[in-house]
Each structure stands twice: as C-alpha cells, then as structure tokens.
Amino acid sequence: MKKNLHKILKYLFNITFFLFFVVVTLLGITLFLHHKPTWRLSSEVTKEEKSTEQENRVAVDGKDIKTGLLDDKGIEVVIFNCTRCHSAKLITQNRANRQGWLAMIRWMQSSQNLWDLGENEKIILDYLEKNYAPEKQGRRKNLSNIEWYKLD
Amino acid sequence: MTGFGLDAVYGALMPEGEDFLGIQDPYELFQKHEDMVLLNDKPWNMEAQAHLLNDYVTPASKMFIRNNGLIPQKIDLENWQLTIDGESAITQKKYSLADLKNNFEPYTYHLTLECGGNGRSEFNPPAKGNQWTVGAVSCAKWTGVRLRDLLEDVGVKSDAVYIGYYGEDSHLSGDPSKKPISRGVPITKAMLEETLVAYQMNGEDIPLVHGFPLRLVAGGWPASASGKWLTRLSIRNKVHDGAKMGGASYRVPCKPVAPGAKVLDENMCIIESMPVKSLITYPKTGAILSGNKNLKINGHAWAGELPVKQMEYSIDFGATWHLCKLKQPTNRLAWQQWDVEVNFPQKGYYEVWAKATDSSGVSQPTILPGWNPKGYLNNACHRIAIQVS
C-alpha cells in the first residue's frame, strides 16, 4: 500500500514536472516568435511564421486591417517583405509605375539594407504596379475634401 | 536639464516598440494637437494643417515630425557628449551638456524650419516619400550656443568645406552600423550668427521627438540639415558624405528637367536655402460667410536665407493681386506675419490665393514649380476655399 502510494506520488510529480517544462518551453517559443526583432533578416524567418502571418490577416472593405494595404494577389509577400523596417503607410502614401517602384526597391537595396527579393520581386512589383499606380493629374488639382463650416 | 526630470525623459522613451496590441497613440506620446495628420508611424512622420500654424511662435504640439529612423531608446544626460572632430578641425574636443550651457554665451532666435519635401503630394508624376501637403513647416524659438563659437573653440583649418552631423537615432533595419541620416551645412552657413547648437525650444527642453537634448538648427534650410539627438559634428575638408547626402535625397536636378525625367546622380545638386513661400493660417479652409462679405485673413511668409519684401493675395485665381500688410521678422530667418481684410464682391465660391515675394524679387508660382525626382521645394501659392452665401 505505502509503496504504491509512493509510486503514484512519484508518477504525479513526474507528470507535473513534465507539463511544467512543456508550458515553459511553449511560452518561450511564443514570446520569441512574437518579439520578432527587425534585424532578423528575411532569410532567418521560418516558413511557419510566414504562414501564420497569412492566416491571421483580416481584410475589410478591400483593405488589410493591420497594414491598410489593398487586399489583392501578392499582398502576403508584400507584407512579409515590405513592413519589416517601416510601416506600410510608406507604401500606401506613394504612387508610381512599375519602373518607379523598381527604382525605390533598388534604392533600398543599395543603401537601406533591403535584401535580394529573388522571385518575390515580380510578385511584389505586380502588386504595387496594379494597386498603387499614379493617377492622371494636371499641373494643379482642384481643391478637394473641403469641410465646409460656418464662420461669422 | 531644467524642469525635465530624468524620469520624465525615460518615461517618454519607449516610442519605437509596440505595445501588446501593436498600437501606439502618437498624439499622446508626443503631445500633439488632435488636428495634426499622421503620415507614418514607423518611422514617425506627422504634419500640421495650415490653420494649426496660426501662432507666430509654433508650439511643440503643432510642430511637424520628420523622422528618418528610430528615436533613441535611451538618453543619458549625465554622459551626453558632443564631439567636434574632422579632417579640418585643428583640435578635437568633447563637450558635456553642462559645458555647453556654462562655458558659452547663449543665443535665442526664431528660426523657420521647413521639410525639403513639404508640398511633395502635389507633384506629377508623383514623387517618392512621405506625401506632405502644406504643414511640414514651423518657426519656433530656439536657444543654444552659436555653432561658430564651438568651431572657433576647436579651431578650423582654412580648407574646411562642410560640417557633417551625427545623431543618436538608429536605422530602421536595426543595423547598428548604419545611420538613418547624417547631413549638415557648408562652413559658410555654419559660421552665420543664427546657426545654433540648441538645447532649448520655446524656453523649455527640446521635446524628445524634436531632438532632445541637443539639436543643430540651421534656419531657412531644409530641416534635414538640422540634425537631432546630436552627438558629433565633423569639420570636413569636402562636402559631407553621410547618409542622405547623395543620390536623390535632399537634392534636385542642377538644371531644370521635364516632369518624370530620369536624372543621373552627378546631375543632382544639394538643396541649400529654401525658396520663398507663405501660408494662410486664418481662416481654416472651407469657411462659409453669410452676408458678411468682409473677411480678415492672416498668415506667415518666409524665404529661406532672404527676407520677404511683399505679400499679396488674389480671389480671382491670380487674375488680380492685392497687397497685404507685412511685418518685419523678429530676427533674420524667422517667418514674417501678414494680414489683410478681403472683400468678396458677390455671393459664390472663392479661392483665396497667397503669394509672397522675396527681397531679390522672386515670387511664388501659382502652379507647381519645376518637377524633381523626390518632389522637393514645392512653393506654389497656398489656397483656401471660401463660400459667400
């Protein structure tokens, strides 16, 4: 009887210890993945991290909620490669043709530590060219978005 | 530092990291007016709207933010040092904040700082970068030591060409070996009375986001020449070659080019003095006047290194121009206040256009000035819409 109790206690102790170990490890991994320092370059980022990013995306009114980028083919690759140093606001503010976008990418590669995008470059350029192309406009636009108010 | 406890400093110092939800309120963080417009949250870029800039002395709450990198995470005031060195320095010296405050005469000037890219959003074809409209300009009261006094203390060789600055901000990529920006001014500008190494803005410590505890301030030049979080000034025997001194950054084609043209690096020239410009800061655009056809309007005008000699407005899209009353600046490189009473002849939609002319007779264009790859120097007339009903 006593021996059995001792065995059971030891067993329980082992299980508790094991569970504790598992929880701590999982917590550690989660925190590590969540932290994501920018200086971990693209090559160091795991496939899993990339797919989590895709699954967690929510789009409302055709826009990705977190980044404000237009929801379209290639957006995951853009988010993945283009929002690690600065926010996507730098993209959504800008308009350019394909050549212009490529020039910005080349500038970031030559002077701002942007990595070689490999085959993703085409996906990114297709996305940017389609969604953030220049609008036709003259030498000066009409005033717009005026919020009229009474002044006396 | 006066009236700004260390705790307060450290408390304000976590701007770059995200909180658990990834949300940060820049209005609270930097104590900005609610009408300021956020252009980017990493790096922080924020601009005023014209009507916010009505004060003669721009308060911190209405001053635009242009950051190229990340704000320093830690400011160690006790050990903060400004090093002056370089090929054309006779000696090399280090100054603590106390040295600067105790051993040199303090000077205070109202200095106009405008982002080189202010107005970029209007260029066609579109120009790259933050899409500033009209609000990336300020004129605050800066206090500090004259850069000239420091340069003379160190000794400047006769071959000196440029002063390059280095600050404590870090590069967006996190690479510790890279600087987000390291620009400066030619030695001639550095030697002018109003070029300061400032430790106060509007009589208080400089706000963290604007360069606490030390900032180079070169009024009338693109604000990027006024390095924040300053730790080092290099007296160079050539044009400074730090980050964002080359390529298309803060440079424009030396000769005029067609919109959208490709310009080679060797044909780009560094922007020096900013061009003549003005703002209508009262009323806010969109005013509806009922019956009352007279309206007092006012604003500021500035012209880089030059004074503004004349201010005009038009309510008929530039067909006729009328003079405004224009004040003298408090000191050189400060913006100048103007005001006038406008009479609208009948009911309808009007635009008020404002046009300043500098002391050399150069005026603001009514349409966009010359296109350039990065969309700098848009000094087209400011316009507001008015309805008389």
Image (cartoon, coloured by chain):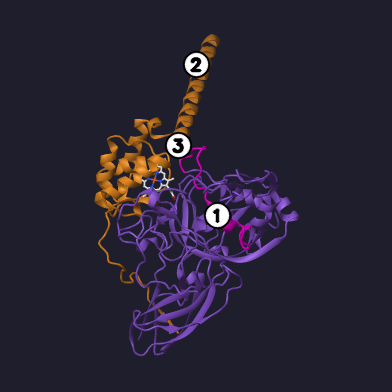
Chain colours: A orange, B purple
Quadrant (top left/top right/bottom left/bottom right) for the N terminus of chain B: bottom right
Task: Specify the subunit that label 1 lies on.
Answer: B
Please identify the quarter of the rendering in which residue B343 is found: bottom left
Residue drawn at x 36%, y 90% as measured from the top left = B345
**Which amino acid type corresponds to the residue marked 2 in the rendered image?**
Tyr
Crowd class of label 1 (few under 14; some 14 to 19; many from 20; radius 10 Å): some
| Residue A8 to residue B33: above or below | above
Was residue B268 drawn as part of the magenta stretch in this picture? no
Was residue B174 drawn as part of the magenta stretch in this picture? yes
Q: Nearer the viewer, residue B139 or B156?
A: B156
**Which amino acid type corresponds to the residue marked 3 in the rendered image?**
Lys
Task: Specify the subunit that label 2 lies on.
Answer: A
Query: Which residue carries the number 3 mark?
Result: A36
**Marks 1 and 2 close (CB-CB < 8 Å):** no
Query: Which residue carries the number 2 mark?
Result: A11
Residue drawn at x 42%, y 39% as measured from the top left = A113
Residue drawn at x 44%, y 34% as measured from the top left = A40
Tell me the magenta residue range: B172-196
Q: Which residue is the extreme one toward the right?
A: B102
**Marks 1 and 3 close (CB-CB < 8 Å):** no
Residue A1 position in % (x across, y down) = 53, 10
Total numbered labels: 3
